[in-house]
Structures are given as structure tokens and as C-alpha cells.
């Protein structure tokens, strides 16, 4: 099979598409014929900092040479004891961290992992949107987002940001999406109640009116946060912020237990249920993937280079 093999990690990374042996599913595993995958910010982080991945996320696992979290495809074969899937089933989800991933024609994963059945009406390249939504949802759950809540999503054009807007609308919140000029129409198409260009005076004049400010790209300054958030309400972020400015606030919020400044993370073991929830939203027309670009597997190095520019909107799809 063809697979994108990482031949060198770090700042001088290298990827080569090679022929490698097709994996065989062990007991309790399924073999997925991948039709679509993605290159995302998580993949880029592991590509450049693999030791950090193994220390924090995949402790105790050996290094891997094939990345790729989001996938959509078909079950090719099943291992002994598998009862939930059969050959030919359309599936999607997120591969487990710490083992070879979905940037290949085939990969194996446990049937108990973050894998779900895929509706026939959803194309493969529109189903590979789980990771962004999976990391957006906890920020909304942290404040029990619902009708009457005013939420601002800063960076509402990326994989996490586009998901946050749509999920917040599903929960009934009033959503203000903050994006760059070129993404205004796209943000409106996601259902945001108000779309604001962060380069304009309109953004600087919004005022302290939001119960949740969600920085989906980790780029907000302290001044921006303070002038947008209502007193005593919650600021959620995905990153340490410019110059790692968020670290002391995150630590203090953790120490005092008030959770007014958070990096919201999904509960352990929640991924499988979330994958199924997201497919329900797709089928109902309440969630859709925003696809920026598509690359063939042979051009995956170009996809990594593009994602590392930080300019992508939504997801970058690999057509396997």
C-alpha cells in the first residue's frame, strides 16, 4: 500500500510517499481502507515536536512514522471478535494517538475507538472534520452554552473555529464570529448571528458583552480579552497565546478552581460518542465541513507546508 512516511521529524522534517506492507487487523481491530484524511495543526505539531507528543499525549508508546487523525473510508477487513462492523461498511472518525495513522491507503484501529458509521449521503471528503469539532465542543460545554448566551469565537475560520460557530448555534447561543476580511462570507454561511472583521473599528468597539470568549487560534491579546468578556465569565483558548501569556492565568484559574480561564479538553473516553453525535448533526444539516484545499496523497508534503503557514480556513483534505 502507499503511505506518507515521515523520514525526518523536527524543523527540517521530510515526508516521502512509499510502498509499505498492508497492515493486518489484530483481534478487536478493524482494517480501514482510507478514502480521505486531513493534515491539521495537530499533525504539524507532532511532525515538528514528536518528543512532546510522546511525553504528553502518547506516553509509553513507540514512535510512529505515519501521521493522520481524521479519516473516512470503508472497512476492508475485521479481526477476531469484532462484532460492530463488517467489510464494506462506510466509516469515519479519529484514529488513536500513538500508532500509525490515516495518511495511508490502509490503517488499523480498535473497533471500540473513535469510529462511527457514515451515512451514504455524506461524501468522504466532508466527513473528515471530527478533530476540530471535538476540541471546540468542550469550550461550549464548559459554560453550558444555550439559548440567550452570547458567545464570541475569535478565529472562526479554522477547523476549531468553524466547528465552534456551528455547534454553538446548534446549542441555541447567539454567536459573534471574528475573522479576517477574506473569510467574512464563509463565516456568515455557517450561521453566525454577527460576523466581524478583526481589522476594523467594529471589532474594537464590541464592548464587554460576552459570557464566553473562545479564542480558537490562540492569538488574542490580554487587552482584547478584557474588553470583550463580561466580568466573572469564561475565556477559553486552544493555545498558550502570544509569548505564552496565557500560562499564569491558566495556572491561577486551576488553583482557585473558578475555571474562568481555561483550555477546555474533551473528557477521556468521550471520542466515540462524539463521532456519532457529529454524524447526526451532518445528516440533519446542522454541521458541515469547510474544506479549504484538497491534495492527493502524493502531494501531502505540499499540504503540510500550506497548513504550517497558518492561513488555512476549515480543513485541508488528503484524497487517498
Image (cartoon, helix red, strand yellow):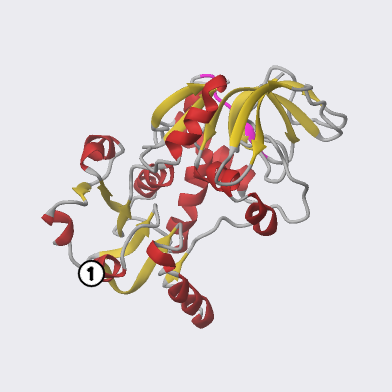
Residue 287 drawn at (x, y percent): 41, 36
The quadrant where residue 25 appears: top right
Residue 316 drawn at (x, y percent): 45, 32
Q: Quadrant of the C terminus?
A: top right
> Which residue ends up furthest to the front in the rendered image?
12
Task: State left or right for residue 91 relative to residue 42.
Answer: right
The quadrant where residue 212 appears: bottom left
Residue 181 drawn at (x, y percent): 20, 41
Residue drawn at 38 percent across, 47 percent down: 161
Q: Nearer the viewer, residue 282 or 59?
A: 59
Task: State left or right for residue 147 relative to residue 115.
Answer: left
Task: State left or right for residue 296 relative to residue 292.
Answer: right
Q: Is residue 260 visible?
A: yes
Q: Nearer the viewer, residue 185 or 45?
A: 45
The quadrant where residue 84 appears: top right
Residue drawn at 23 percent across, 37 percent down: 182
Q: Does 117 lie within the magenta span?
A: yes
Q: Is residue 127 visible?
A: no
Image position of 32 with respect to 171: above or below: above
Q: Which residue is mark 1?
A: 227
Crowding near pointer 1: few (<14 within 10 Å), some, many (20+)?
Answer: some
Q: Quadrant of the N terminus?
A: top right
Magenta residues span: 114-120
Q: Does 236 lie within the magenta span?
A: no
Amino acid at each position: 500500500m502507499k503511505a506518507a512516511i515521515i523520514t525526518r521529524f523536527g524543523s527540517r522534517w521530510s515526508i516521502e510517499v512509499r510502498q509499505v506492507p498492508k497492515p493486518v487487523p489484530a483481534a478487536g481491530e478493524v482494517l480501514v481502507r482510507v478514502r480521505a484524511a486531513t493534515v491539521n495543526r495537530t499533525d504539524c505539531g507532532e511532525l515538528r515536536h514528536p518528543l512532546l507528543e510522546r511525553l504528553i499525549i502518547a506516553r509509553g508508546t513507540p514512535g510512529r512514522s505515519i501521521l493522520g487523525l481524521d479519516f473516512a473510508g470503508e472497512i476492508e477487513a475485521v479481526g477476531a471478535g469484532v462484532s460492530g462492523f463488517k467489510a464494506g461498511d462506510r466509516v469515519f472518525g479519529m484514529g488513536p494517538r500513538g500508532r500509525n495513522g490515516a495518511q495511508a491507503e490502509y490503517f488499523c484501529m480498535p473497533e471500540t475507538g473513535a469510529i462511527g458509521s457514515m451515512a451514504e449521503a455524506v461524501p468522504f471528503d466532508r466527513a473528515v472534520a471530527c478533530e476540530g469539532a471535538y476540541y471546540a465542543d468542550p469550550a461550549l460545554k464548559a459554560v453550558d452554552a444555550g439559548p440567550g448566551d452570547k458567545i464570541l469565537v475569535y478565529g472562526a475560520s479554522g477547523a476549531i473555529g468553524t466547528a465552534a460557530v456551528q455547534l454553538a448555534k446548534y446549542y441555541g447561543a447567539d454567536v459573534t464570529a471574528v475573522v479576517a476580511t477574506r473569510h467574512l462570507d464563509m463565516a456568515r454561511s455557517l450561521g453566525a448571528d454577527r460576523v466581524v472583521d478583526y481589522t476594523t473599528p467594529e471589532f474594537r468597539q464590541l464592548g464587554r458583552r460576552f459570557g464566553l470568549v473562545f479564542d480558537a487560534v490562540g492569538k488574542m491579546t490580554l487587552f482584547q480579552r478584557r474588553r470583550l468578556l463580561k466580568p466573572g465569565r469564561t475565556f477559553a483558548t486552544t493555545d498558550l497565546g502570544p509569548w505564552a501569556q496565557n500560562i499564569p492565568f491558566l495556572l491561577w484559574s486551576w488553583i482557585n478552581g473558578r475555571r474562568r480561564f481555561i483550555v477546555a479538553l474533551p473528557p477521556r473516553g468521550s471520542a466515540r460518542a462524539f463521532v456519532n453525535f457529529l454524524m447526526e448533526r451532518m445528516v440533519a444539516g446542522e454541521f458541515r465541513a469547510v474544506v479549504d484545499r484538497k491534495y492527493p496523497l502524493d502531494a501531502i508534503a505540499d499540504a503540510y507546508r500550506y497548513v504550517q503557514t497558518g492561513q488555512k480556513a476549515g480543513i485541508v483534505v488528503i484524497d487517498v
